[in-house]
Amino acid sequence: MRVLLISDSGRPFLEHVRPHIADFLGGAVKRLAFVTAASLGDEIAYYQRAQAALGPLPPDGVGVQVLHLRWSAEPLATLERADALFVGGGNTYALLKRLREARLLEPIRARVQAGMPYIGSSAGSNVAGPRILTTNDWNVVALEAFDALGLVPFNINPHYRETDPTMAAGSETRDDRISEYHTVWDNPVAGIEEGTLVRVDAGAVTVCGRGRVKVFARGAAPRWFGNGERLPV
């Protein structure tokens, strides 16, 4: 499988990670379906931002036709037309709920397992893992089932920060929450810093970008990995 997981909320939209997206897609992808189901706002406006960021030829884009995969409007037909899939960020619980309601989880999984490139950003990265329990989002849609696509064997914590200077001393950290996750579940968790990507290609899991990834494994000390290094997950 070919998977690219992005942790980036910088402005302009996708500017810092666009070269990595272009390299990942290569020249074979002509039609990229962009999934806006994680948005709790205007999905049309969100799609238009993606179209403007990805549609133009390099260096202003990646030179693909960007299709709008709307979870509420014939999503399977759009998925069938696409050569690659980009699941955008927003609220992870809303995203998973809508993908499930639209009966998209299995078709997406099948297409990616058959070789279709998958790109996920933030919430879109979260749903690539076995379950979404390490997201930073609030469950405002009262989702009750948390199993996700399972494209990779590790969970994601995007926008990872080891420490937050705005928090009071002694406050619960991301590391504390991930440690709580490991009291129940035993799969690894990848904390991905801003401006950083994890690329899965031919079985290799590699860090890309300007930040780092912190890998949490149950019963072991967390380890940091930087650009070009492979993750032991």
Image (tube, rainbow, N blue to C red):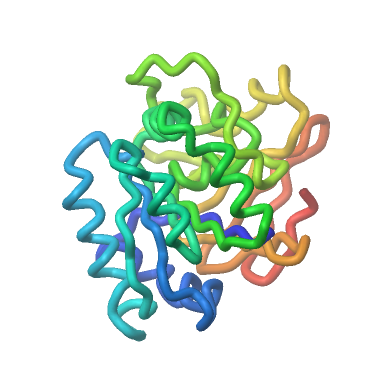
Please indicate whether residue 177 sits to the left or right of residue 95 in the image: right
Please identify the quarter of the rendering in which residue 164 is found: top left
Identified at 41% across, 56% down, the residue is 8
Q: Which of these two is toward me, 64 or 170?
A: 64
Would you say 104 lies left or right of 230 here? left
For residue 136, say whether it is visible: no
- Which residue is at the front of the view, 172 or 111? 111
Identify the residue at horizontal 41%, vertical 65% (top origin). Answer: 32
Note whether 141 is above or below 15 in the view shown: above
Where in the figure is residue 10, as x and y percent of width and height? Answer: 32, 59
Vertical side of 113 occupied by 117: above or below: below
User: Residue 116: where, in percent of width, then height?
Assistant: 58, 61
Quarter of the image holding residue 229?
A: bottom right
Q: Residue at x 38, y 45 (%)?
A: 75
Quadrant in which the N terminus is drawn: bottom right
Q: Position of residue 43 (x, y in %)?
A: 22, 45
The image quadrant of residue 183 is top right
Q: Residue at x 60, y 30 (%)?
A: 131
| 85, 4: nearer the viewer | 85
Frontmost residue, 50 versus 207: 50
Q: Is residue 120 among the parts visible in the rendering?
A: yes
Residue 127 in the image, given as x and y percentages of width and height: 53, 39
Number of labels in the image equals: 0
